[in-house]
Image (tube, grey):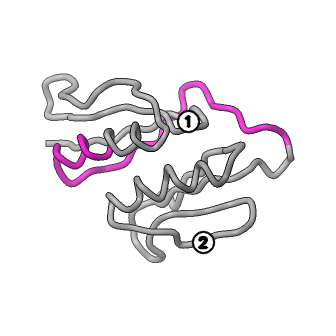
Amino acid sequence: MIGYVTVGTNDLARAARFYDAIAAELGVGRMMEFDSFIAWGTPGDPRAGIAATRPFDGNPATVGNGIMVAFEAKDRDQVDRLHAIALANGGTCEGPPGPRGEDGFYAGYFRDPDGNKLNAFIMA
């Protein structure tokens, strides 16, 4: 149902480096690019893409409290790699990879360089 998710950025070049690394691990690349907007994913793929944009209204990008984008990984090792890639590319840790609860949910939480909260997860 969701086609793509957009996060705001105040530094598109920095966001591009961060999301290029995350997208590469997930096996996708840039699918759309303008001066103020870059989207990653695969056209026609049923999985949602992600985009980083400078806000259209010209005001600074801010982080939405309670908003998070989740990347579905193929296995626990990929969750671990995505978390490490995020930190290596200017992200910050919001919770190291590991099991959450007892229902097979495994996730690692991080923020991008602009402070947007993200996670990588797998449902066992």
Rendering quarter of residue 110:
top left
| Residue at x 40% of width, y 53% of height | 22
| Residue at x 60% of width, y 49% of height | 14
Q: Inspect the image, locate mark 2, and give the three-letter code of the amino acid beneath it.
A: Met
Q: Secondary structure at mark 1?
A: loop
Neighbour tally class for label 1: few under 14, some 14-19, many 20 plus, Cα within 10 Å? many
Asked whether disc 1 touches disc 2, contact meaning CB atoms under 8 Å apart, the reply is: no
Q: Secondary structure at mark 2?
A: strand
Question: Quick check: 77 left or right of 19?
Answer: left
Tell me the distance, in whole angstroms, between the alpha carbons under discs 1 and 2. 20 Å
Q: Is residue 34 above or below residue 104?
A: below
Query: In terms of sequence position, does the residue under pointer 1 or pointer 2 come before the other?
Result: 2
Q: Which mark is residue 107?
A: none
Q: Which mark is residue 32?
A: 2
Q: Residue 106 at x, y = what percent?
A: 21, 35
Query: Disc 1 marks which residue?
Result: 116
Read off the magenta span.
Answer: 59-82
Neighbour tally class for label 2: few under 14, some 14-19, many 20 plus, Cα within 10 Å? few
- State yes or no: residue 65 in magenta: yes
| Residue at x 13% of width, y 24% of height | 102
